[in-house]
Image (cartoon, rainbow, N blue to C red):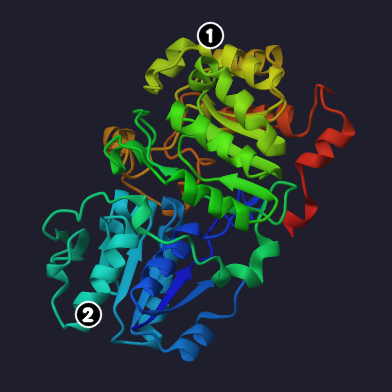
Amino acid sequence: MNILLLRPVPGNERFGLGPFFRIEPLGMEYIAAALEADGHLVTLADLRFSRSLDHQMRRTRPALVGIAAMHALETDEVLALAAQVRALSPDVPIVVGGHTAAACPGPFLSRHVSAVVLDDAERAMPLLCAALECRRPLTSVPGLALPDGEGGDLRTGGEAGAFALEDVPLPARRHVAAWRRQYACLAHRPVWLVETARGCPFRCSFCSIWQLHARAVRERSIEAVCRDLATVGDHIFVADDLFWHHPSRSLALAQELVRRGICKQWILVQSRVDLVARHPDLLEAWRPVAREFDIFFGLEAATNEGLSGLMKDATVDQTVLGIEVARRLGYGVTGNFVIDPAWGEDDFERLWAFVERHQLHQAGFTILTPLPGTSYFEQMRPNLRARRWANFDMHHALWEPSLGAPRFFELYCETWRRSVLNLRGRKSLWQWMREVDPRNAL
C-alpha cells in the first residue's frame, strides 16, 4: 500500500517555543519503519519545510494518509489539512494520530477524518493497513476511535494494548534527511531526536503522559539504543518523558555507551530533580557521554504548596538539591515554571526571588493550561466554553486571571524579561548569545 504521512505546520511556528525548538517527527519515522517492515511504500512529508501538499498528493497518489497531531494548539491546523487532503482525494482514508489525538480524539473526528489512532501507532497503523487491504471494516481494528455519525465517537474493541518497543525497527530517518539542517534546539543544529523509553509513572495534574500510558514505562533494549546513538549526529535531544527513571538500566546503558566510545557534542534530556538528587551516581556515569550535557527539569513551582497543588510529588528541598547535584557534576540546568492565572502579585515575587536565589538563569515560564487528556482539563472544562485551540499554547490565559488580564500579563512578561533579557546582568554576553540562534527566528 502507498502511504503518505504528513507533519503539519503548527500554529505557533513563529511564536512561543516554536522558533527555538524545531525537532524532527520521530514518531512518524518509527511509523514509517513499522509500515515498511510490512512491505508498504511510505512517503513522509514535513510540511514545515517540504513542498506543497498538492505536490505531495500528486506525486505519491496515496491509498492512505496519516496526519500527526502533536499538541492541542495544532488541532485547527490538523483539521484544515485533513480538509485539504479530502478536497484533493475525495475517497482516500485519512487517519489522525499523535499524543494529543490519542489523549482526546473527539475534536479530530471531523467529516474528513476516517479514524483517530488511540494505540501506539507503530502497532495500530500496520493493523489498519491490513484491514484496508482485505476490505475489512475499520471497526475490526483495535485501538481506534471512529466517528459514530452523530457527533460522537466509537471505540473499536478496546486498545490493541501496549507492546514491546523492541517490536519496532529503528526509525526510518532517511525520510527527513533533506531537512536535517532545519531541526534545531536553541543554538544547536542540526539536532537529532532519540527515544530510549516511553511513559512516566508520576501523576502531575497538568500532564497527560501518565494517563495515556497508564503510568507505565517501556524501554528499548540497551543494544537498540546504542545502535541508534551510534548512527545519529552530534547534537541529541532525548525524547524520553523521564530520563534516568530506571536506575540500574540507565547505569548499564551509560557504561555500554562509554565502552563503545560513543561521545556526542551535546545531549539534552528531561528528568526530575528528586530523581537526580537520589542518584548522583547516574549523572557521574553519564557525564562522559557528551562534551556538553544539559538537563531540562520541570521545576513547576517555587513553593511546596505550589508543587502539591500540581500533584508533583516533590518538594522544594529536592529541587534545590537536584539542581546542586547536576551543577556540581558538570551539567547545564534549564528549568520550567508554571504560572497559575489564580496567582496574586506575591506569588510572582516569590518566584522571582527563588529564581534569583538559585541563579536559574536558563528558565522558562508557561501559563498553567488545561491540556486535553489531563485531569486538570476535566476540572476546568466548565471554564472553557469558548474554546480556541490556537490559544492552548501555554502562553495564553484561557480565562480571566485573578489579577485581571492587563496586570497578569504585565507580571508574566516581567518574569520572562528577567530571564531572557538578563536584566539582572547575571549572564555574560557570550552566555546569552549561545542560548539564542537568530536563524531559528527567521
Residue lying farthest to the top in this orientation: 317
Which residue is identified by label 2? 132
Q: Residue at x 40, y 23 (%)?
A: 310
**Which quadrant of the rendered structure holds the N terminus?**
bottom left
Number of residues whose C-alpha sits closer than 10 Å to that of mark 1, classed few (under 14), some (14–19) or many (20 or more): few
Q: Residue furthest front?
A: 259
In this rendering, the label closer to the viewer, 1 or 2: 2
Q: Nearer the viewer, residue 346 or 206?
A: 206
Q: Secondary structure at mark 2?
A: helix
Q: Residues within 10 Å of mark 2 (few under 14, many from 20)?
A: some
- Give the camera-side residue of 365 and 274: 274
Q: Please, what is the three-letter code of the amino acid marked with disc 2?
A: Leu
Coordinates of residue 18 in the picture (x, y in percent): 61, 52
**Residue 195 visible in the current orientation:** no
Can residue 389 be seen here? The reply is yes
Residue highlighted by disc 1: 317
